[in-house]
Amino acid sequence: MENELSNLLQELDLVPCGALKPLSGGDIAAVYRLETRQGTVIIKHDDAERLAGEADGLRTLREASSRLIVPEVIGQRDNWLVMEALEAAPRNARSETCLGEGLRELHGTNGDRHGWPRDNACGLTPQPNAPLNDGRAFQRERRLLPLAAACRQKKRLDEALHGRIEAIAWSLEGWLPDIRASLVHGDLWSGNVLFTPQGPAVIDPAVYQHYPDVDLAMLTLFGAPGAAFFEAYWKGDAPADWPRREALFQLYPLLNHLLLFGGAYRSGVERTVARLEAHRA
């Protein structure tokens, strides 16, 4: 075990009972399970800045959530993050309802500006969060335009598709209302939702304050929430403009995946751009 981690565990009064056990799914960070005399913990090894952003997000979500389970940050230093281990349980309609209720509560935590006091990361992609008063401007200046430019620079977008995305980014004031910002998880795909005996849990956040649709669109893009989730979240019918909002807030994660993983995601970007253009026709 590396000296940095050994020193951190010693400071936290955690006494290991064995070796680190690698866990699957650590595409970005190395993730381990460790048995200690004080209980089981999860340990991540990654870039120090990304881990500091994740620890900040976990603490924020834990403070804001009474219905969602958020693992406790036990300690973080340099390239190591130590957090509470969660026990898995089967997913069912009741847990979907609790997830919808919990996310609704989380999104009820509001701020006056869109963004966050610190930058963080969505996967391996740096995520700029410098606050702006207008949510449309934030979506354009901090999300769509920078990521589209990065994809263009890596030749993963051609000039025509890049121009169509820019046009969408500059059209937001024409249809998207400016609302008070909600606290969002920021990377809420299905793999970052766990179901535990105590209720639904969320992990690996990239928090900021923005439109709550950020989390809903990510869940429907990389997962399939059931009817019970949406009934609990919306407490009635979906907003009339949800299909358009869903497409808009799926464009950023699709661009991120195109940037990170290449051409397999280009068709998804093209379809989403076409969906948004159809609403303008």
Image (spheres, helix red, strand yellow):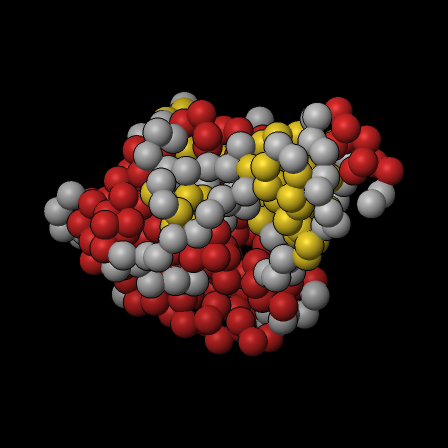
Across and down, in percent, residue 226 comes to 25, 59
Residue at the farthest right position = 3
Specify the quadrant that holds the N terminus. top right
Side of 103 relative to 139 (left or right): left
Side of 187 relative to 241 (left or right): right
Across and down, in percent, residue 175 comes to 30, 47
Quarter-of-image position of residue 148: bottom right
Tell me if residue 201 comes above or below residue 15 in the rendering.
below
Tell me if residue 130 comes above or below residue 18 in the rendering.
above
Quarter-of-image position of residue 57: top right
Q: Nearer the viewer, residue 64 or 70?
A: 70
Tell me if residue 22 comes above or below residue 5 in the rendering.
below
Q: Residue at x 30, y 67 (%)?
A: 278
Q: Is residue 53 visible?
A: no
Side of 256 relative to 15 (left or right): left
Across and down, in percent, residue 145 comes to 56, 51
Side of 9 relative to 271 (left or right): right
Residue at the farthest left position = 236
Q: Residue at x 63, y 57 (%)?
A: 23
Across and down, in percent, residue 189 comes to 45, 55
Q: Is residue 9 visible?
A: yes
Q: Nearer the viewer, residue 174 or 44?
A: 44
Q: Residue at x 45, y 44 (%)?
A: 202
Quarter-of-image position of residue 153: bottom right
